[in-house]
Image (cartoon, rainbow, N blue to C red):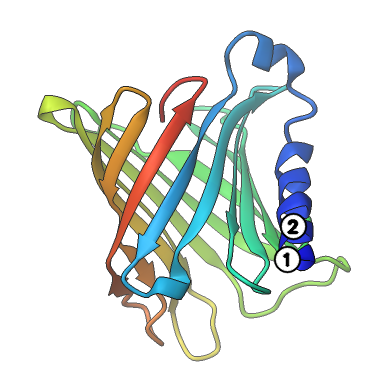
Amino acid sequence: MTNILKNILTAGLASLAVLTAPKKAEAQGNVHGNVEYIQSQVSENSYPKLNMFYNLPGRVNGYTFAEFYKADKGYFGRTNLNRPITHGVGPRTTIVHDGAPFSQVGLGIGAVVPNMPRNVSASVGLLPVWLDNQGRIVRNKTEIQYFVNANLPLGFNINSFGNLNVADQEGPQWSYGEISAGRNIGPIRLSYNPALRNNGNAMPRLEHRAKVTLNFGGTR
């Protein structure tokens, strides 16, 4: 129990660390997020999750999530920082929190996909440079990232994200992704939330899950 509390506290501090700067933005209502519980068809893969969306000085858009696993599995999270410069294109940084506040950092470029249909938005990223927590280059890792969101009639919404490592020694490897299809009912969202897990190649393996989300400071 002590280890679980320690992991949750550390993960919470890691998530809050990136939020200490935007106090002015928070006062203006530019910080929002949610708390989720994800129930998987594989019981041990069920966990709570914290998501935070915020703005940092210099027109940097930030997103941090932290997943808190059962028993001694610790936590995992990521922080994505984007700074659009022109036409939605600009530098992107991804910080990985794998049981520690800082495990790896990826550097690259992100872009908002233009000319999408009404009520649909999408973004992509290419991160060819990765460093570990000692500042050493992480070899055989170039990550392609995507996010797509569609608002549907009757208040329904579907979105998906995913990461693909195109530089793995064994060829392109799907890393992880999710699909979320659901509807907000007040501050609560109920979703079908399958995980897209690594299957030993570039094609993901589907794991069925359900998700309950409690939004605060706005919806996402």
Task: Say above or below: 4 vs 14.
Answer: below
The residue at 67%/59% (across/down) is 96
Q: In which quarter of the view is residue 42 placed?
A: bottom left
- Determine contact: label 2, label 1, CB under 8 Å: yes
In the picture, measured across the screen, residue 136 lies left or right of residue 56, that is right
Residue 220 seen in render: yes
Disc 2 on helix, strand or loop? Answer: helix
Q: In which quarter of the view is residue 208 placed?
A: bottom left
**Residue 196 at x, y = what percent?**
35, 67
Residue 87 seen in render: no
- Farthest residue to the left: give it: 153
In the picture, measured across the screen, residue 5 lies left or right of residue 29, that is right
Q: Nearer the viewer, mark 2 or mark 1?
A: 1
User: Is disc 2 surrounded by few (<14), some (14 to 19) or many (20+) residues within 10 Å?
Assistant: few
Q: Amino acid at mark 2?
A: Leu
The residue at 41%/78% (across/down) is 198
- Farthest residue to the front: give it: 1
User: Is disc 1 surrounded by few (<14), some (14 to 19) or many (20+) residues within 10 Å?
Assistant: few
- Farthest residue to the bottom: give it: 170
The residue at 83%/65% (across/down) is 133
Disc 1 on helix, strand or loop? Answer: loop
Q: Nearer the viewer, residue 164 or 218?
A: 218
Q: Nearer the viewer, residue 60 or 155?
A: 155
Q: Quadrant of the C terminus?
A: top left
Q: In which quarter of the view is residue 183 placed?
A: top left
Q: Which residue is mark 1?
A: 1
Task: Say above or below: 197 vs 101.
Answer: below
Task: Say above or below: 101 vs 79.
Answer: below
**Residue 16 at x, y = what percent?**
74, 38
In the picture, measured across the screen, residue 170 lies left or right of residue 141, that is left
Q: Amino acid at mark 1?
A: Met
Q: Which mark is residue 5?
A: 2
